[in-house]
Amino acid sequence: MIFYAIRGAITVKENTPQHILEGTTTLLETIIEKNEIDYKDIVSIIFTGTKDLDAQYPAVAARKMGMVDIP
């Protein structure tokens, strides 16, 4: 099995759950599309954020996209 590491980053206009979820969803969708990945093949995702963005945890976006079995 081959593994790849892919990194991405976003900015958001405001520290609101809506902006964080929208930005994270766009980032994940873009990474998956551009790299032709089936999210079922993803073995892990690490989310980090700056201290000023605390209104929502980005992993919530991944869960809403159906990525519920990815640690």
Image: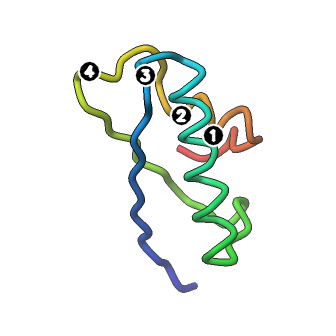
Q: CA–CA distance between discs 4 and 3?
A: 10 Å
Amino acid at dot 4: Asp
Amino acid at dot 1: Ala
Q: CA–CA distance between discs 4 and 1?
A: 21 Å
Answer whether labels 2 and 1 touch (C-beta < 8 Å).
yes
Residue that extends furthest to the bottom in the rendered view of this protein: 2
Residue drawn at x 42%, y 47% as measured from the top left? 10
Asked which secondary structure carries label 3, the reply is: loop
Residue drawn at x 40%, y 47% as measured from the top left? 46
- The residue wearing badge 2 is 59
Image mark for residue 14: 3
Q: Which of marks 2 and 3 is nearer the N terminus?
A: 3
Q: CA–CA distance between discs 2 and 4?
A: 17 Å
Residue count near mark 3 (Cα–Cα under 10 Å), binned few <14, some 14–19, many ≥20: few
Q: CA–CA distance between discs 2 and 1?
A: 5 Å
Amino acid at dot 3: Glu
- The residue wearing badge 4 is 52
Answer whether labels 2 and 3 touch (C-beta < 8 Å).
no
